[in-house]
C-alpha cells in the first residue's frame, strides 16, 4: 500500500465512450502525475499538477483531459480514444513538484480500447 | 533517444544467486533512482543515489553510481523468487523544450527461479 489509490483497476471501453480514471493520494503531497505505460516502451509522462495547477502537459492529445479539483484527487477524463491508447495508466504523487525526489505510484488502471 | 537505458533487458537466475542490472544515461544528473514493478502493478521506489554519492545500500540492495561513465548498477544479493519483477532506473534530465523531468528507462525484467 503506497498511499496512492487508483480506480478502476481495469477498464474496457469502445472508441465512442466517455470514461474517467480516478486517483487519490493520502500522503499529504502537493504534486500529482499521470504516466502512460505501453508494452516495450518507457514510461511516458502525460501531466503534472502542483498545488492543483497544471504545470506540465507533455503534448498529450486532447482526447485525454486531466482534472485536479484538490491536492488529493486527480482525474483523467477519456473520450473518443483509439486502440493505441490501450495501456496501463499510472498515477503518482510526490511531496512537491520537483524531479529530485521519490515518486509514489498507484497500482495503475489497465485500459483497453476496442 | 531516452536518457536512461537498462541492461540487460531480461535476466533469469536461480534463487540464491546475485542479480546485477545496469543503467546508462546521457546527460548530467542530480540523482538517479531505482524502481521496481511487479507485473501489471505500480512502481515502487527502491533507492535514490545522489550525484555526489558513489555507493548506497538498502538491505539486500546495493547501488553504485559512476558519474564519469554516466552509469549505475543495481545489485540484488541472495535473490528470492519474490524478487521477480521489472526494475527501472530514473534520472532527472533536461528534456527537449527546456523543461526538467524524471525520465525512466525501459527496464530490466528479472526472473528468479525457485
Image (cartoon, helix red, strand yellow):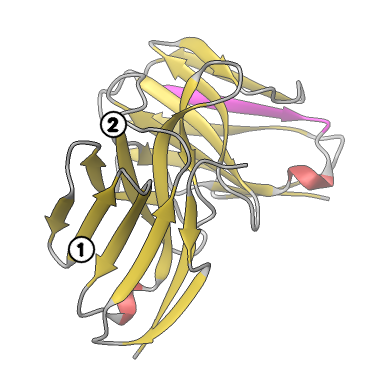
Query: Between A41 and A1, which is closer to the camera in this rendering?
Result: A41
* Labelled disc at residue B61: 1
Residue A76 lies within the magenta run:
yes
Q: Is residue A12 left or right of residue B79?
A: right
Q: Residue B24: where, in percent of width, then height?
A: 44, 51
**Image label count:** 2
The part of the chain drawn in magenta is A72-80
Query: Between B86 and B18, which is closer to the camera in this rendering?
Result: B18
Q: Residue A47: where, in percent of width, then height?
A: 56, 24
Q: Tell me the residue at 32%/42% (across/down).
A: B32
Q: Tell me the residue at 29%/87% (across/down).
A: B15
Q: Is residue B36 left or right of residue B94?
A: left
Query: Between A30 and A6, which is closer to the camera in this rendering?
Result: A30
Do we see residue B15 in this rendering? Answer: yes
What residue does disc 2 label? A101
Query: Between A31 and B108, which is closer to the camera in this rendering?
Result: B108
Using the image, name the chain to which the residue with label 2 belongs: A
Secondary structure at badge 1 equals strand
Against A19, is A1 above or below? below
Measured Cα–Cα span from mark 1 to mark 2: 19 Å
Q: Tell me the residue at 53%/67% (across/down).
A: B9
Picture quadrant where residue A20 is located: top right
Amino acid at each position: 500500500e503506497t498511499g496512492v489509490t487508483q480506480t478502476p483497476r481495469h477498464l474496457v471501453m469502445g472508441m465512442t465512450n466517455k470514461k474517467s480514471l480516478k486517483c487519490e493520494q493520502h500522503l499529504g503531497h502537493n504534486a500529482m502525475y499521470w504516466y502512460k505505460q505501453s508494452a516495450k516502451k518507457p514510461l511516458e509522462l502525460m501531466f503534472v499538477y502542483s498545488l492543483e495547477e497544471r504545470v506540465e502537459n507533455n503534448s498529450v492529445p486532447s482526447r485525454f483531459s486531466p482534472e485536479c479539483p484538490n491536492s488529493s484527487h486527480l482525474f483523467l477524463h477519456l473520450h473518443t480514444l483509439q486502440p493505441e491508447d490501450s495501456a496501463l495508466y499510472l498515477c503518482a504523487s510526490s511531496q512537491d513538484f520537483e524531479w529530485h525526489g521519490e515518486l509514489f505510484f498507484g497500482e495503475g488502471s489497465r485500459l483497453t480500447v476496442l | 533517444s531516452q536518457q536512461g537505458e537498462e541492461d540487460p533487458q531480461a535476466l533469469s537466475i536461480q534463487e540464491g544467486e546475485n542479480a546485477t542490472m545496469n543503467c546508462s544515461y546521457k546527460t548530467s544528473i542530480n540523482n538517479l533512482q531505482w524502481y521496481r514493478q511487479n507485473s501489471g502493478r505500480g512502481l515502487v521506489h527502491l533507492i535514490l543515489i545522489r550525484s555526489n554519492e558513489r555507493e548506497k545500500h538498502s538491505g539486500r540492495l546495493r547501488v553504485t553510481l559512476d558519474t564519469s561513465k554516466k552509469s549505475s548498477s543495481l545489485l540484488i544479493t541472495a535473490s528470492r523468487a519474490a524478487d521477480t519483477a521489472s526494475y527501472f532506473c530514473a534520472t532527472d534530465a533536461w528534456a527537449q523544450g527546456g523543461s526538467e523531468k524524471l525520465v525512466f528507462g525501459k527496464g530490466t525484467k528479472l526472473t528468479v527461479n525457485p
